[in-house]
Amino acid sequence: MNSEHVLGWIAFAVTIVYTALGLPVQIRRNAVNRSMTGLSLFMTSALLCTFSSWVAYGLVKNPRDWYIVASNLPGVIGAAALMFQFWKYRKK
């Protein structure tokens, strides 16, 4: 395994740990409280755009970069869930 693959696996692991631990905890907290208090809609939108951009980049890169796609896809899902919660728990 060359250094490129080692760095790819390290980046993959760090990103997965962040998205697999941080985002689900926040999503659950929002659901329990039925509130998005303390979260910024702008920053959550930026997070969704960032993860989505990385996934798109990994898919269009030749050859495809599956480290980037696989590690950022959970972030797209988590950020999309947060955006849905902003809509669901909005003040009416």
Image (cartoon, grey):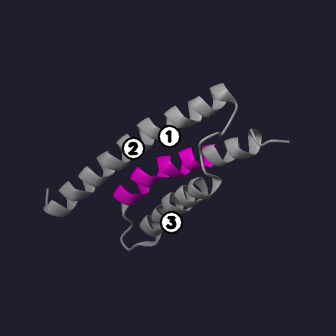
Residue that numbered label 1 is attached to = 23
Q: How far from the left and from the top, in percent, is residue 77?
A: 56, 47
Residue that numbered label 2 is attached to = 18
Q: Residue furthest right?
A: 92
Q: How far from the left and from the top, in percent, is residue 17?
A: 36, 41
Residue that numbered label 3 is attached to = 53
> Residue, x 48% and y 51% (percent of image)?
73
Is 76 left or right of 8, judged from the image as shown?
A: right
Is 89 left or right of 77, judged from the image as shown?
A: right
Q: Nearer the viewer, mark 3 or mark 1?
A: 1
Of the numbered discs 3 and 1, the one sitting upstream in the chain is: 1
Q: Indicate the amino acid at tag 3.
A: Ser
On-image quarter of the N terminus: bottom left
Q: Residue furthest top?
A: 32
Name the image quarter holding residue 43.
bottom right
Q: Indicate the amino acid at tag 2.
A: Tyr
Q: CA distance from mark 3 to mark 1?
A: 18 Å
Q: Of residues 3 and 35, which is closer to you in this image?
A: 35
Is 83 left or right of 79, judged from the image as shown?
A: right
* Disc marking residue 82: none
Residue 78, magenta (yes or no): yes
